[in-house]
Image (cartoon, grey):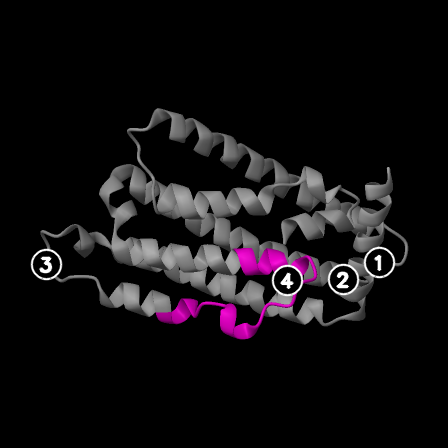
Amino acid sequence: MIVFLLAIGGVPPKDVIWARGVNTVVGGALARWNPADKSWLQELERVRRGARTARANLEASIDRLGSEPGTTREQIARLSAALASSHRFIHALMALDAVFLQQPALASSPPLTNFLSKVETTLALFASTLRGARAPSKDFPNLREEHRLMVQSRTSDASSALARFDSINIEADRITNSVNTLAEQITQWTRTPEFAALHKRKLELEAENAKI
């Protein structure tokens, strides 16, 4: 999604790896995070820096787009709304990261690992959709149901690590809400003439670059 949005502001898609970075953070840092592996922590920090830089570039691109002739308020509002949803998603991930720093064992719990795997699948489908592919709705995981199953798995045993899952469930709920909202925003945008024109222009630029 970010790759495509940045392309609107004139940033070459090949230079943007934000979406890939987020997928790596979700699938790796949360599901397979191992604090004893210093090399992995270094890689995680590198990805974090890349994500922060790309997000800052996106915000700057939207600001520049707002000053371009022909840009409508609806276009800016649409992009700003998607950006706000992505912020909520990132903030929830950061909160989970803080929890795992205190209780690393929770990061590898099967219910959470399964939930984050479904989130990663959803993000990958977003990226594919924004590049022009048509992903059937049946391919998108039901994140709300996955979250429900994760909450349901929490034990009432105070001595169990899962008894401390409340904060994780809260942040997972924020992730679910933000990603589901993004799904609606992306679906609406991909049905507009504006998106069709942008996708056509993207294909033309790729064809021109291939000739160089």
Percent position (x, y) of residue 43?
A: 46, 30
Q: Which residues are magenta?
A: 124-145
Q: CA distance from mark 2 to mark 1?
A: 7 Å
> What residue do we see at 74% from left, 58% from top?
76
Q: CA distance from mark 3 to mark 2?
A: 50 Å
Q: Which residue is mark 3?
A: 157
Decide which of tag 3 and tag 2 comes sooner along the chain.
Answer: 2
Q: Which residue is mark 2?
A: 75
Quarter placement of the N terminus = bottom right
> Could you say whether the residue bearing mark 3 is in a helix, strand or loop?
loop
Percent position (x, y) of residue 147?
A: 35, 65
Decide which of tag 4 and tag 1 comes sooner along the chain.
Answer: 1
Vertical comparison of 66 with 176: above or below: above
Quarter placement of the C terminus = top right
Q: Residues within 10 Å of mark 1 (few under 14, many from 20)?
A: few
Query: Is 138 included in the stretch rendered in magenta?
Result: yes
Label placed on residue 129: 4
Decide which of tag 2 and tag 4 comes sooner along the chain.
Answer: 2
Q: Are marks 2 and 4 in contact (CB under 8 Å)?
A: no
Q: Look at the image and tell me whether residue 174 can be seen.
A: yes
Percent position (x, y) of residue 196?
A: 79, 65
Q: Are marks 4 and 1 in contact (CB under 8 Å)?
A: no
> What residue do we see at 40% from left, 43% from top?
28
Identify residue type, mark 4.
Thr
Q: CA distance from mark 4 to mark 1?
A: 23 Å
Tell whether 113 sits left or right of 204: left
> Could you say whether the residue bearing mark 4 is in a helix, strand or loop?
helix
